[in-house]
Amino acid sequence: MRVITWTFQTKCFARVKTLQKLTPQFYTAPAPPLQANQVFIDAFELCCNLRGTGWNWSQHLQIPQETRPTRSPTAFVAATLYSLFLHLLQFDALQYSIQWLGPTTLGSAEGASIFDANLPPLLRYTRSTVITFLSGMTVYTAIQAGYHIPTIFGVLVFKQDPSLWPPAFKTPWLSTSLTEFWAKRWHQLFRDIFIAIGGKPLSLLLGRAGGVLGVFTISGILHDIGLWGMGRGADFLNVGGFFIINGLGLCLEQLWRSFTGRRVGGWSGRVWTLVWVIGWGHILVDAWATKGLMGSAFFPQNWRLTTYIFGPLW
């Protein structure tokens, strides 16, 4: 997907060494000539930098506020290591909780639906909602931990400025609208790909709504490919459907604003966002569960702290 994006690039890429040098003029100024010894370094950085932090092709990127010390690389790495450790513990606890709700079914490698037909409707959907919420938090902690590892590597090995590794998320649970959730608070790692391949082409045909739906359609395709990679087939109806429906939710928010003159927000917006994401999240999480993702062994059982505290599940 990134190769497709680069194929139609008309402007030379350029990057800065620290985010403090990102100015409005940087995005419009001609790219400076590259020195011979810098070409391969920039090429490697370009291939690894999904979000485009510090590059001129990532204009309007939402960068979360940094909470770690950035003046000292040592202090920054220490804070990142501490956060990595905490998120790995949280990830293990969340996955264990999901597996505990069905050790031989949902939590097994064979997989099972999050909807237990043996339970009465109220308990069945309460259970599926809890699983969906826990799964969302599991994804959050996994991405956060996964992002911390190259952060440490980039600062320690490649001597990059800590400012080039801002947080991946901006407290997504505080979102007061779907637009805020997806455009500002959820991670922006694939933002450029989704806009270039899905958003821009469809916006030319169908306007803003087409651009939004194009972005979420490409997102659905990418996530479905990830599920297909498990070797148990794809499920675009549910995986892709979740993302396309969220794109539709953003269009509904824009429609609300055009009729009322007010943005979705406040406590009502927070409830709306929570209900929409978790409600439709059932179909995504059920697709994951039936393929056996919940039973994946990310850590050996004897490495899991939850195993020592609560005992093995199998």
Image (spheres, rainbow, N blue to C red):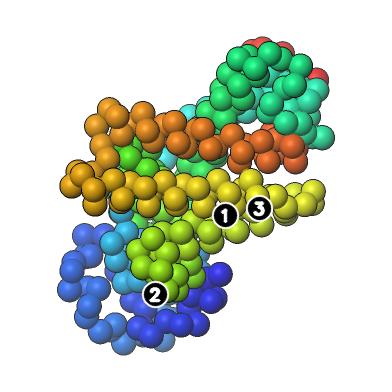
Amino acid beneath label 3: Phe
Q: Label 1, secondary structure: give it.
A: helix
Q: Residue at x 33, y 46 (%)?
A: 253
Above/below status of 46 relative to 295: below
Q: Residue at x 36, y 68 (%)?
A: 207
Q: Quadrant of residue 20?
A: bottom left
Amino acid beneath label 1: Gly
- Quadrant assignment for the C terminus: top right
Is residue 15 left or right of 226 when viewed as pictured?
Answer: left
Q: Label 2, secondary structure: give it.
A: helix
Circle 1/circle 3 CB separation < 8 Å: yes
**Viewer-proximal residue among 237 and 133:** 237
Label 2: which residue?
204
Is residue 141 left or right of 38 when viewed as pictured?
Answer: right
Is residue 92 left or right of 247 when viewed as pictured?
Answer: right
Q: Position of residue 248 (x, y in %)?
A: 44, 50
**Viewer-proximal residue among 291 and 299:** 291
Q: Is residue 168 visible?
A: no
Q: Position of residue 173 (x, y in %)?
A: 38, 32
Q: Position of residue 146 (x, y in %)?
A: 53, 45
Of the two numbered discs 1 and 2 in the rendering, the one whose residue sits closer to the viewer: 2
Q: Sequence-wise, which precedes: disc 1 or disc 2? A: 2
Alpha carbon of mark 1 to alpha carbon of mark 2: how far? Answer: 20 Å
Q: Position of residue 120 (x, y in %)?
A: 68, 13
Q: Quadrant of residue 128?
A: top right
**Viewer-proximal residue among 311 and 275:** 275
Q: Residue at x 68, y 28 (%)?
A: 114
Q: Label 3, secondary structure: give it.
A: helix
Label 3: which residue?
236
- Tell me the number on the disc at residue 220: 1
